[in-house]
Image (spheres, grey):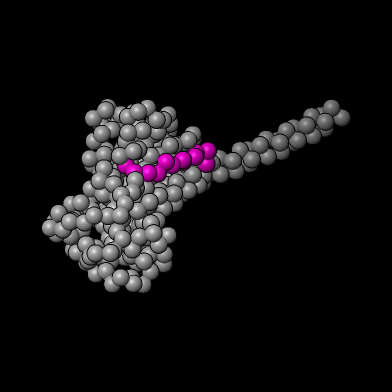
């Protein structure tokens, strides 16, 4: 009789343990389903212009964006500094374990560095001509894509004390004007605009990139500089911008590409996808760039 009671008690305890195990397992399964539903609804960077999820585009059928890791080294035109720095921070926040480092400068110098063997994963140029240097050397992986365009503007001292109202005004005697070097996209574009207006201009200096040209005005070492409108906007109250119609004849396309020597291909492709996504375009057009 006693043994029968003990067996009954043991059986009851076993049944209760079984029920608790099933309840825990069921709760865990429900949580897993909820987590799957949440991740399925998360679109990462949203949709790009083609209507495809940019998160899906960035993975290119490889690891999902959440699994990206490693350092992405981006060589980019100086005029992209503010926009790309912001996008780099956004990318790192979206993909813990990644790090985006930048080298900003004149596109011609960056292209020469890449073809010379400098380690980089992504190249964003301020003109197709400088991008062609890289593609002709066989250092690009795939076909470069234009992601934004940029237009010139005259940067003057705050308040425009010299009353500069046109590109022709820059040819006035005694006015200290700075241009980008002719080998740099902003310098080539300025030359094209001057030719469109039938104007000749001798600057006090040619600068290696657009930031250096703008800085001459900021430091009051020049009265004006022909730079990109994005750089005028980035400088805020330090300069004043003057539009001129000839700039419409010298708009620069900005191409971007993955480089053949990329060390973390998935992460590099994902950064390019962010730049070209709706979110990336919002940051870039907000800085004054034109849509491609």
Give the vertical position of 137 relative to 157 (above or below).
above
User: Quadrant location of residue 142?
Assistant: top left
251 vs 218, nearest the viewer: 218
265 in magenta: no
Q: Residue at position x 59%, y 41% from top?
A: 28
6 vs 284, nearest the viewer: 284
One can see residue 50 in this view: no
Assign the N terminus to one quadrant of the image.
Answer: top right
Q: Is residue 137 left or right of residue 67?
A: left
Give how far across and how far down residue 156 sits, in percent: 33, 65
Span colored in magenta: 96-107
Q: Is residue 88 left or right of residue 110?
A: right
**Residue at the extreme front:** 174
219 vs 87, nearest the viewer: 219
Q: Residue at position x 53%, y 38% from top?
A: 97
**Residue at the extreme right:** 2
One can see residue 190 in this view: yes
Tally of marks: 0
User: Quadrant location of residue 59?
Assistant: top left
Give how far across and how far down residue 257 sits, in percent: 31, 37
Give how far across and how far down residue 124 sits, in percent: 33, 42
Q: Residue at position x 12%, y 58% from top?
A: 198
Give the vertical position of 244 relative to 99 (above or below).
below
Give how far across and how far down residue 54 sits, in percent: 35, 45
Give the vertical position of 48 relative to 11 (above or below).
below
Q: Residue at position x 14%, y 54% from top?
A: 195
Q: Is residue 250 left or right of residue 22?
A: left
- Magenta region, main secondary structure: strand
């Amino acid at each position: 009789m006693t043994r029968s009671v003990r067996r009954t008690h043991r059986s009851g305890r076993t049944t209760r343990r079984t029920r608790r195990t099933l309840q825990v397992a069921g709760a865990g399964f429900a949580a897993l389903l909820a987590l799957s539903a949440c991740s399925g609804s998360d679109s990462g960077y949203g949709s790009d212009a083609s209507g495809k999820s940019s998160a899906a585009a960035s993975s290119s059928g490889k690891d999902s964006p959440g699994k990206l890791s490693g350092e992405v080294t981006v060589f980019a035109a100086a005029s992209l500094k503010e926009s790309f720095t912001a996008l780099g921070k956004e990318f790192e926040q979206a993909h813990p374990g990644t790090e985006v480092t930048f080298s900003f400068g004149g596109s011609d110098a960056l292209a020469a560095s890449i073809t010379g063997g400098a380690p980089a994963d992504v190249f964003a140029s301020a003109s197709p001509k400088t991008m062609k240097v890289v593609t002709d050397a066989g250092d690009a992986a795939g076909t470069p894509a234009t992601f934004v365009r940029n237009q010139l503007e005259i940067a003057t001292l705050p308040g425009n004390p010299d009353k500069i109202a046109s590109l022709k005004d820059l040819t006035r005697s005694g006015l200290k004007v700075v241009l980008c070097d002719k080998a740099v996209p902003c310098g080539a574009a300025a030359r094209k605009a001057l030719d469109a207006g039938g104007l000749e201009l001798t600057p006090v200096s040619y600068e290696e990139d657009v930031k250096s040209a703008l800085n001459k005005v900021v430091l009051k070492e020049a009265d004006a500089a022909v730079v990109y409108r994005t750089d005028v906007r980035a400088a805020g109250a330090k300069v004043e911008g003057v539009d001129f119609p000839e700039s419409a004849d010298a708009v620069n396309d900005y191409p971007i590409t993955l480089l053949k020597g990329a060390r973390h291909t998935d992460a590099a492709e994902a950064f390019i996808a962010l730049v070209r996504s709706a979110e990336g375009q919002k940051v870039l057009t907000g800085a004054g760039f034109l849509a491609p």
